[in-house]
Amino acid sequence: MKTLQQIMIALAAVTLCVACQWGNNVLPMADILKTDSVGFKIDDAKGLYQISADFTKTPAVAEWMSEMLGGTYEGDYLDGEEMMTYYTNEHKDNILKDCAVDIDDEAYEEHASEFSFEAQFKKGYETPRFVTYDLTESVYCGGAHGSYLIQGQTFRKADGRRITWDILKDQYSDEFQGIMKDGLKEYFEADSDEKLQEFFLNPDHIYLVPLPQQPPLFKEDGVHFVYQQYEIAAYAFGLPSFVVSYDRIRPFLNVTGQRLIE
């Protein structure tokens, strides 16, 4: 029987894998991306399944959306309605199969109408140099609680490049580690390294705080660091996150990163 922790770790691994992939989309993006609201919804006796998006006919972004939803869609990436319809049906089938494995037949029949999968892509922030998309996902397959993910991607508009943590330098320095600890202390309301360590699933993380598997999200107020459930802390502590202002993180960005925020 799969545990929620195993499911969340697998989903986070998909996020990391997708961030490392890159297609052949090298067309520059418009200064301001035009978007349309697209989506598809299934609400029946076997649950609620829906996907919606601020969809843009920009190959790099559309391809990323497809990969984040599973990467199995073989149609036209620029047909947002068709893509969302396909993935909504696919996720319904997958959730029903997974739930059938995780719970007994009686519970399956009793709770099938409560099963759900919801995903929403939103254009979170945009400048002439980059655009950041946010993705929220929630899954419920019976039990005490479901799972929730906050993901996203920043794209360089010049060529559609997906921005990852390789835009950092000196991330293992005491100064940068101090920045990360400050952000996590604020999230957990911990007033010392000793208190912060108590929240980590791996106590050794206090000596070298890992970067999130989720890539950096460049927003209006700075760079967002977002960890998923179970990534560094127990489920009860949600999705640890914090923001580092551009002024504070600038010395730790390489030239690629610095040019994004000029």
Image: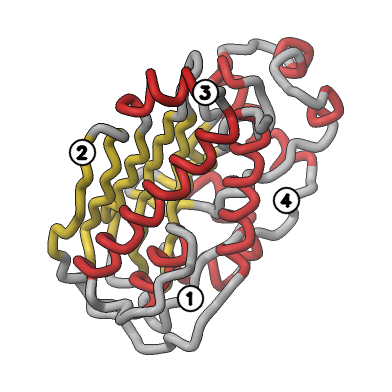
Image quadrant holding the N terminus, namely: top right
Q: Marks 2/4: CA distance? A: 46 Å
Residue holding disc 2: 43
Quick one: label 1 or label 2, which is nearer the N terminus? 2
Position of residue 262 measured from the top left corner of the image (x, y, whole percent): 40, 66
Q: Is residue 124 visible?
A: no
Along the viewing direction, whichever of 53 and 89 lies nearer the viewer? 89
- Point out which mark residue 171 bears: 4
Disc 3 crowd rating (10 Å Cα; few below 14, some 14-19, many 20+) is some
Q: Amino acid at mark 4?
A: Gln
Query: As drawn, is 45 to the left or to the right of 191?
Result: left
Q: Marks 1/2: CA distance? A: 36 Å
Along the viewing direction, whichever of 207 and 238 lies nearer the viewer? 238
Quick one: label 2 or label 4, which is nearer the N terminus? 2
Disc 2 crowd rating (10 Å Cα; few below 14, some 14-19, many 20+) is few
Residue holding disc 3: 238
* Mark nearer the viewer, 3 or 4: 3
- Point out which mark residue 161 bears: 1
Q: Amino acid at mark 1?
A: Arg
Q: Regarding mark 3 in the picture, which secondary structure is present there?
A: loop
Q: Amino acid at mark 2?
A: Asp
Q: Is residue 16 visible?
A: yes
The reply to whether callout 1 and callout 2 are in contact (CB within 8 Å) is no
* Mark nearer the viewer, 3 or 2: 2
Q: Is 133 located above or below residue 245 in the figure?
A: below
